[in-house]
């Protein structure tokens, strides 16, 4: 008998009439299902339907039927469903509810009514499993994006659901954490758990046992064969200088005596394990974080636009159009139209930003920054989150146009395939830079990657 069945499930959000067309699927115990499809095709919506979040938390037009271990998700309370099925959100911040890491994990266990001894045993197990033991008393919102994703995974997996639905579970994880999660999923499938993954980086999970694939169509159209038309005025030779940078967050020192330089005209990828300080570095360069030390571009304060790792933090207007044009008294409408076309946002001009998919929100956040024409260039924190292969290609073409004008572009990423296509790769460790050079050179420095605590896929070393 299948643990999960979906029969002709279709859904439409009332705000914009987007959603999913009828889909049928079934997943048995000890089986893994990989759901693929372009950004915006409805993978997250399907995940919400399968777990009962639709219709209990999302109001709209739902057709068809979903059952989990015989329970109809439309009429079974969420608290009861949570004992059978667990969902990892694509954006882990959206499922953080408590004031500490350990309370986040205990919250779901307490709602299940487990004995105290059983809760404590499960807590200690998942804290160790996901490398969270030393963070157990920290507030979840002070963690890095990757650490938050590990916490969300820990909280879901501590409940030991029979069915596990994971929405982009590898998007914020470093390579070592990703490999550990794959091993965990292999064990779960082997023990009879049904695992459903919505994932763009499908190559990570191809070795899962009993794996099937389901492809969804839809999403915004992409025009890979059309050139990205973009132009920026030619910049003087730009040089970013960082010397003796020291940043503390609360009682924690995140960056200490950090120094590096970057030239305009090149795409620089910053890579390091979760929590090493990549986001903090970008926030400092954007002028959003207090610091000690020197940060200059050609002897002046940097004027760099930052695209956040979590796009929800910089989107707050009622429509895509109003978001991009916000507080621009005389906007360049030709540039606006160019941005819509280049980033695949033309179909969504009147859509509320928070109703977009995570990948679409990420592209919208980029559009809002580019519309303001930052003087020295761009900072992008995990720019490929939620992006399919086609949109990654478009993003790289756009970044190439920007650096061609002489501007600076720095990105943080756990997507090593993306890092391999940049001009320069900087590998960060706990105490500064471990390797710096062309991607080909840095990928070959095995000892540096070991010191960073990161694995490198074999194909990148060849």
Image: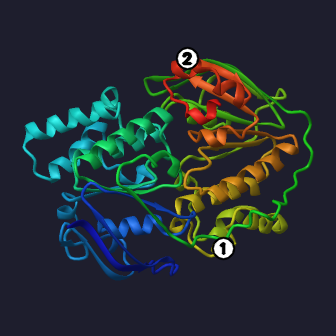
Q: Position of residue 310 (x, y in %)?
A: 53, 50
Marks 1, 2: nearer the viewer: 2
| Neighbours of disc 2 within 10 Å: few (<14), some (14-19), many (20+) | few
Q: Which residue was labeled with disc 2?
A: 431
Task: Tell me what residue is drawn at x 76 percent, y 48 percent.
Answer: 399
Side of 192 relative to 289 (left or right): left
Task: Tell me what residue is drawn at x 45 percent, y 24 percent.
Answer: 252
Instruction: Looking at the picture, tell me which residue is in the foreground, 201 or 363.
Output: 201
Side of 218 relative to 144 (left or right): right
Q: Which mark is residue 388?
A: none
Side of 126 relative to 404 (left or right): left
Query: What is the spatial separation of the Cα atoms under label 1 and label 2, in whole angstroms?
Result: 44 Å
Vertical comparison of 245 with 311: above or below: above
Q: Quadrant of the C terminus?
A: top right
Give the total of numbered labels.
2
Q: Position of residue 304 (x, y in %)?
A: 73, 41
Q: Which residue was labeled with disc 1?
A: 349
Side of 238 relative to 40 (left or right): right
Dot placed on the residue nearer the N-terminal end, 1 or 2: 1
Quadrant of residue 182 within the rendered picture: top left
């Amino acid at each position: 008998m299948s643990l999960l069945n979906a029969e002709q499930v279709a859904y439409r959000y009332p705000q914009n009439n987007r959603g999913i067309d009828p889909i049928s699927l079934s997943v048995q115990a000890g089986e893994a299902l990989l759901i693929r499809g372009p950004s915006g095709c409805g993978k997250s919506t399907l995940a919400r339907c399968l777990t009962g979040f639709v219709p209990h938390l999302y109001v709209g037009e739902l057709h068809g039927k979903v059952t989990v271990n015989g329970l109809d998700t439309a009429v079974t309370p969420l608290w009861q469903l949570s004992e059978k099925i667990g969902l990892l959100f694509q954006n882990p911040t959206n499922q953080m509810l408590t004031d500490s890491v350990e309370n986040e994990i205990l919250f779901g266990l307490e709602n299940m009514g487990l004995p105290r001894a059983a809760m404590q045993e499960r807590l200690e197990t998942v804290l160790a499993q996901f490398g969270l033991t030393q963070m157990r008393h920290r507030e979840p919102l002070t963690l890095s994006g990757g650490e938050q994703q590990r916490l969300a995974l820990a909280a879901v997996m501590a409940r030991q659901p029979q069915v596990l639905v994971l929405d982009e579970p590898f998007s914020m994880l470093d390579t070592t954490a990703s490999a550990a999660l794959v091993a965990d999923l292999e064990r779960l499938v082997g023990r009879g758990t049904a695992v459903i993954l919505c994932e763009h980086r499908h190559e990570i999970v191809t070795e899962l046992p009993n794996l099937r694939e389901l492809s969804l169509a839809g999403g915004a159209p992409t025009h890979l064969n059309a050139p990205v038309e973009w132009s920026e005025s030619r910049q003087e030779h730009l040089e970013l200088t960082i010397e003796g940078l020291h940043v503390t967050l609360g009682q924690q020192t995140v960056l200490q005596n950090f120094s590096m330089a970057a030239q305009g005209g090149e795409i620089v990828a910053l890579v390091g394990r979760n929590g090493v300080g990549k986001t903090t570095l970008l926030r400092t360069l954007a002028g959003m974080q207090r610091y000690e030390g020197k940060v200059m571009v050609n002897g002046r304060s940097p004027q760099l636009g930052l695209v956040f790792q979590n796009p929800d933090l910089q989107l707050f207007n009622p429509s895509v159009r109003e978001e991009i044009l916000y507080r621009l008294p005389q906007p360049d409408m030709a540039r606006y139209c160019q941005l819509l076309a280049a980033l695949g946002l033309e179909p969504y001009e009147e859509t509320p930003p928070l109703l977009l998919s995570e990948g679409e929100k990420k592209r919208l956040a980029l559009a809002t920054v580019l519309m303001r024409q930052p003087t020295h260039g761009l900072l992008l924190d995990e720019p490929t989150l939620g992006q399919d292969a086609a949109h990654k290609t478009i993003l790289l073409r756009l970044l190439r146009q920007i650096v061609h004008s002489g501007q600076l572009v720095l990105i943080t990423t756990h997507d090593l395939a993306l890092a391999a296509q940049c001009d320069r790769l900087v590998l960060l460790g706990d105490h500064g830079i471990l390797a710096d050079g062309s991607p080909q050179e840095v990928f070959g420095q095995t000892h540096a990657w070991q010191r960073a605590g990161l694995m490198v896929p074999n194909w990148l070393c060849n």
